[in-house]
Amino acid sequence: MANPVLNERAFQTSLEFENNQAMTINGTILKTCFLGLLMSATFAYTWYLIGSGFLDKAIMLSHGGLIGGLVLVFIICFAPKNKFLIITTPLYALCEGLILGYLSALINARFPGIASQAAIGTILTLFGMFFLYSTKIVKATEKFKMIIFNSTLAIFMIYFIQFILGFFNITIPGIFSNSPIGIAFSIICVAVASFNLIIDFDMIENLSGRLPKTYEWYCGFSLLVTIVWMYIEILNLLAKIQSRNN
């Protein structure tokens, strides 16, 4: 297990099929793509607002997206997995787009073209990881899962510690700067986020046919969480590299 919202314990409370329809891999892929389109729509909207000079409105929407996204994450993860997933997961995707569009537009204003580079890098990595998984070049063994899980936990602990230290205007030395150490840390984060996709693919394949079709929305949401994390880490890495060149 690596993705904290995509694990078997999340599915143990509801294993009865609705209308004898089971979750499928193709259905999960389609729903993930749909969620991605929704996220792209609100992403483009907040990007447009900043580009058109409506910064205050973009800030308000991004803050609303952040709060709404956090509330929806808890609802999606801990509420019973039922038909409401068809409502909560698209709403989450819309909220996520508001945040990413705002952040991406701001960073892109400083480093023109960086957002499109990060998006292309994310798409290429996604397909690259799927190729590695589908051809069994990289296998989601128990040892592999444990390494990625521990690495993911360590990264999020570092981010959490930095979040707490930020209240006291303290920054962890090196890793959040554009120094070689900071760039190396970002490369590790990108790699760990990417390999989380292997575990997500494996989990979805193993759960396919065992859960109701509504869980395709949950798995689509889980994949979206990993993809968004990967995009943010790639964006952060590119920003550090470009800031050294300027």
Image: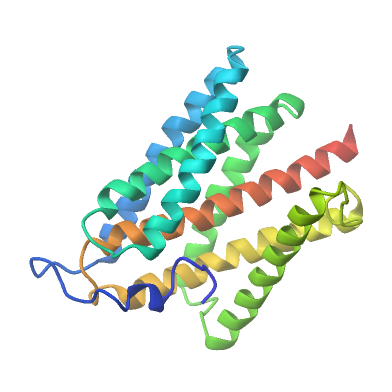
Tag count in the figure?
0
Question: Tell me, what colour scheme is on the image?
Answer: rainbow
- Residue drawn at x 49%, y 72% as measured from the top left: 199
Q: Is residue 118 left or right of residue 78?
A: right
The residue furthest top is 52
Residue 17, quarter of the rendered image: bottom left
Q: Is residue 192 left or right of residue 47?
A: right
Front residue (pair 225, 243): 225
Residue 106: give x, y in percent of width and height. 68, 28
- Residue drawn at x 34%, y 44% as measured from the top left: 90
The residue furthest left is 19
Q: Relative to 217, is 11 above or below?
A: below
- Residue drawn at x 58%, y 68% as measured from the top left: 195
Front residue (pair 164, 129): 164
Residue 159: in sight, yes or no? yes
Residue 39: give x, y in percent of width and height. 44, 39
Q: Is residue 157 left or right of residue 132?
A: right
Residue 136: give x, y in percent of width and height. 48, 77
Q: Relative to 140, is 201 above or below?
A: above
Residue 218: give x, y in percent of width and height. 34, 60
- Residue drawn at x 18%, y 69% as measured from the top left: 22
Residue 132: in sight, yes or no? no
